Amino acid sequence: MSSRKVVELFYDVVSPYSWLGFEIICRYRNVWNIELKLRPAFLGGVMQGSGNKPPGLVPNKFLYMTKDLDLLAKYCGVPLQPPSDVFEAMFQKGTLSAMRFVTAVQQQEKGGDKQVEQVSRELWRRIWSEDKDITEPASLSEAAKRAGLTDGEIQEVLKLSTSQEIKDKLKNTTEAALKYGAFGFPLLVCHIDGTPQMFFGSDRFELMAHCIGEKWLGPNPDNSAARL
Amino acid sequence: MSSRKVVELFYDVVSPYSWLGFEIICRYRNVWNIELKLRPAFLGGVMQGSGNKPPGLVPNKFLYMTKDLDLLAKYCGVPLQPPSDVFEAMFQKGTLSAMRFVTAVQQQEKGGDKQVEQVSRELWRRIWSEDKDITEPASLSEAAKRAGLTDGEIQEVLKLSTSQEIKDKLKNTTEAALKYGAFGFPLLVCHIDGTPQMFFGSDRFELMAHCIGEK
């Protein structure tokens, strides 16, 4: 059996298209011969480092994306619902604490990334489905609890998430994304015969499949998969 | 047989992703139950009217798009090759004359849009495959000749393309795109039960198919 192709996913829970890309690639983890490496990072840092601006700042783009996300949510089976105040949630409150929290979960998790995956999903659910806060420690704790972490683990992670070690780790992952040439998320990096190949957005899976020698079966490859 | 769904394609030959979208939707014209309406427009006007900026101005985007277009070109079977000086071709020289020319072709064409399609394709081929000019009348004539227009037709279209009538027509089509909410091209507008549904980019065909009940 040929060795698995490493696929890195750089994401930030502030990004709705990242949620789509995340759910889709997670579904393909047992369909394609890949090794998925989750890379929680900070989109604000990527924007700043690449001199890009959030697309939603262009009025026509914001209007289009709202409808686009609604259609994609239904098509992909992801319960996306914009928060009541998108600008407040995304730009004023932001996701720095949340992504430090996810980074801390990853740091303390042993043997796999089930917790990172679940905590990320629960944070997305809060901001991009249930219109809830993800900046307060209580909010992060609720998400982690729903993700299956014990109270003890949650306390550990909360404490760890404000440490210099974790701040640096999030910064380093963000820098790694910029080093690949990132300007936004989601960013998938496939390692094909040692060469990294970038795929930006949640709409390059068909092309990506072709490049890694796999077959694209749509956003729901396993029809019997449980809905979120 | 149910009535065909109208699909409008707003495009400008300055845009490589528009070439991809154009070739793909043209291939589906006889596969899906659609009526394709080509809408040559001016991307510069859409950028200005929507307050957007060309993506290539962000360095990391420019680098990414170069590789992305190369992969997509091979995957989609479109002979995309960037011009030797992308910024000169796209921003300094631009495509105002070219899109007025295409608009004039469409104005004088009777019974269908075969000429509009072919001229558009030949213009894309010049700028986005053969690194050739598309601003001079001689360049536009060459493209039209390869597209099958007669010398007489070419002269007519060249003359018409600088008229106020054609300048206004291109402006109106550009305004129509903006009215739909455009911020870039390609823009496909599917009319589903009387309601227009927008699909931006050359990467929404799977979703679009699902929305119009096709595969």
Image: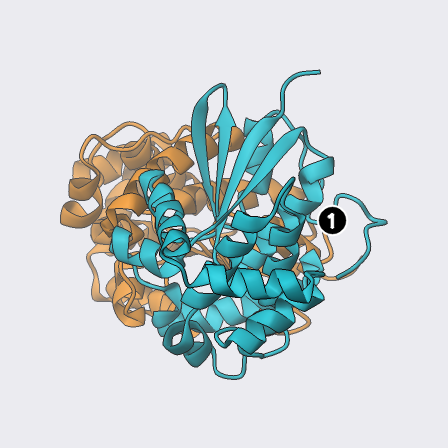
Chain colours: A cyan, B orange
Q: Residue B5 location in percent, x, y?
A: 66, 61
| Quadrant assignment for the C terminus of chain A | bottom right
What type is the residue that disc 1 sits on? Asn
Q: Residue at x 73, y 35 (%)?
A: A31
Residue B177, quarter of picture? bottom left
Residue A208, quarter of picture? top right
Q: Nearer the viewer, residue A185 or A70?
A: A185
Which residue reaches farthest bottom?
A: A84
Q: Residue B103 location in percent, x, y?
A: 34, 55
Q: Identify the residue position indicated by label 1 in the image.
A: A220
Instruction: Residue A16: tell me if it is visible.
Output: no
**Residue A50 located left or right of residue A99:** left
Q: Residue B200 location in percent, x, y?
A: 48, 58
Q: Residue at x 40, y 57 (%)?
A: A42
**Residue A51 located left or right of residue A82:** left
Q: Is residue B106 above or below residue B182?
A: above
| Quadrant assignment for the N terminus of chain A | top right
Q: Nearer the viewer, residue B27 or A200?
A: A200
Q: Residue at x 40, y 49 (%)?
A: A169
Element type at mark 1: loop
